Amino acid sequence: MAEKPWAGRFRQNINQLVEDYSASIAFDKRLYRQDIEGSIAHAGMLASTGLLSEEESAAIISGLKKIREDIENGSFEFDPALEDVHMNIEVELTRRIGEAGKKLHTARSRNDQVATDLRMYVRDEIRSIKALLMDFLQTITEKAEAHVDILVPGMTHLQHAQPISFAHHLLAYFEMFYRDYQRFSDTFARVNVSPLGSAALAGTPHPVDRFMTASALGFDAPSRNSIDAVSDRDFVLEVVFAAALVMMHLSRLAEEIILWNSQEFAFIELPDAYCTGSSIMPQKKNPDVAELVRGKVGSVYGNLVSLLTMMKGLPLAYNRDMQEDKVPLFTTIDTLKASLEVMRGLMDGLSIKTDVLEKLLQAGFITATDIADYLVEKGLPFRDAHQITGNLVVHLEHQGKQLDQTSLDEFKKFSDMFAQDIFTYISPQNSVDRRTSYGGTARNNVRESLREASRILGSLKDEK
Ligand code: ARG
């Protein structure tokens, strides 16, 4: 078994339970690439300021690259006795290249090392989450483009409210996921700061060039305060919060898909490849993907609360508690990426049953607001128009009639302002197309929103 790098101060071997309890290698080996990249930058800097000879630095760098190859081809054996990814790599480097390996940790601590690795990891993941969000926005836009003329019942309180273009409904999600995208961009700027060279907490007496390592690793700047650099995990929290918001948005969409797919709404058809069957009920085609997205949100919210709670009582600077940041972070990112991918496929394959929608749009007095609007156009105050329309609705409800089964005489019982044009006025299509206020559902507005969505997508592609 390899000797622990910190063994000098100890006269007893570590208790096996403690070793098992404290090892993080099972999960933090995921950071090997960032750890090696950080060490390569650190070794290059140590050589440039004279702390390492050029030969030593070259030996370290090529040794690290070989270790990276071995990890990637599966031949590297991580040892839980060496606790974490940082010590596993450093100890193996020294075993392979000898003396020079022992100098790599000059002017560095695992405290600034882990903070650096984790920031690099979060940075990489933000990039891939943004790419997935962009793909998702693209799919939403394409679906919306194909459904400008499809009208669906818009709901409030899950009751028929007013007809809307299905594209307008989908573009509401475009806005939400676009804000999510921007949130990840904003977060990136705060993540992209280099803790490297802060050492344990107080900085280092050795001549280091923190600006050099920051720029070699693609950070915008070195962190300003060595204590803050090793103490905070707000950047982890921020990315988990941004992920929780995406999951919340995905879950609302999932819930709508589940409802629309139920026999009670039944106006969408889901792709077979994204559904599962029942082992007993042969007719079943269940929307499990949407249900699982809705279900997985719970663990992401849980991760956010775990992290907030883990941090809240920690005195500055580093505390081992912070090792517990990794599993919530990693599982959040894995869940988010998989959820975005699977929901994208589900959305892409979703189709609309127009015949069902036509019937649905006749139900629930969905254009009652338009009747009131009609009376307002004829000169009635809105409150009176609202009252009259309400009375009409109660009357029709008692008769068991829908609006399209109502005669002009019946309308006239409630106001003599009604004329023949009421019937075209309250068609769902006209109801939608009159809503031309900025951001409203009129199809002309929706077409303009789609052009704007394409412009936004174009600018995101340029940004990449
Ligand atoms: N595995 C540790 C973590 O993730 C690395 C830092 C350990 N530092 C220490 N002083 N024990 O937090």
Image (cartoon, grey):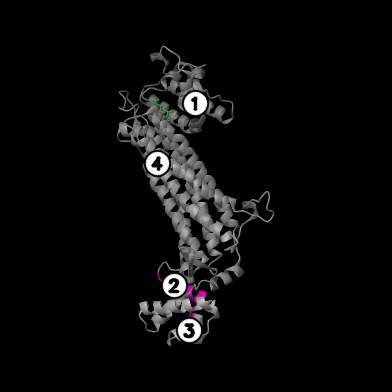
Disc number lying in front (3 or 4): 3
Q: Earlier in the sequence, mark 1 or mark 3?
A: 1
Residue at label 4?
237
- Spatial CA distance of label 3 from label 4 is 59 Å
For residue 57, which quarter of the picture?
Answer: top left
Q: Which comes before the other along the chain, label 3 or label 4?
A: 4
**Label 1: few (<14), some (14–19) or many (≥20) C-alpha neighbours in 10 Å:** many
In what element is the residue under mark 2?
loop
Tell me whether the residue at label 3 lies in contact with that at label 4, contact meaning CB atoms closer than 8 angstroms: no
**Residue at 52% over, 52% down:** 135
Q: Is residue 224 left or right of residue 286?
A: left
**Alpha carbon separation for disc pair 4 and 1:** 30 Å
Question: Which numbered mark, 2 or 1, is in the foreground of this view?
Answer: 2
* Badge number at residue 411: 3
The dot on residue 435 is 2
- Image position, residue 272 (x, y; %): 65, 54
Give yes or no for contact between labels 2 and 3 (Cβ–Cβ under 8 Å). no
- Amino acid at the residue labelled 2: Arg
Segment tinted magenta in the rendering: 425-437
Question: Which sits in the foreground, 355 or 193?
Answer: 355
Q: Nearer the viewer, residue 76 or 219?
A: 76
Outermost residue on the top side: it is 11
Mark 2–mark 1 distance (CA, rounded to whole Å): 63 Å
Q: Position of residue 404 (x, y in %)?
A: 54, 79
Of callouts 4 and 1, the N-terminal one = 1
Going from N to C along the chain, the mark reached first, 2 or 1, is 1
User: Residue 64, labelled with which disc?
Assistant: 1
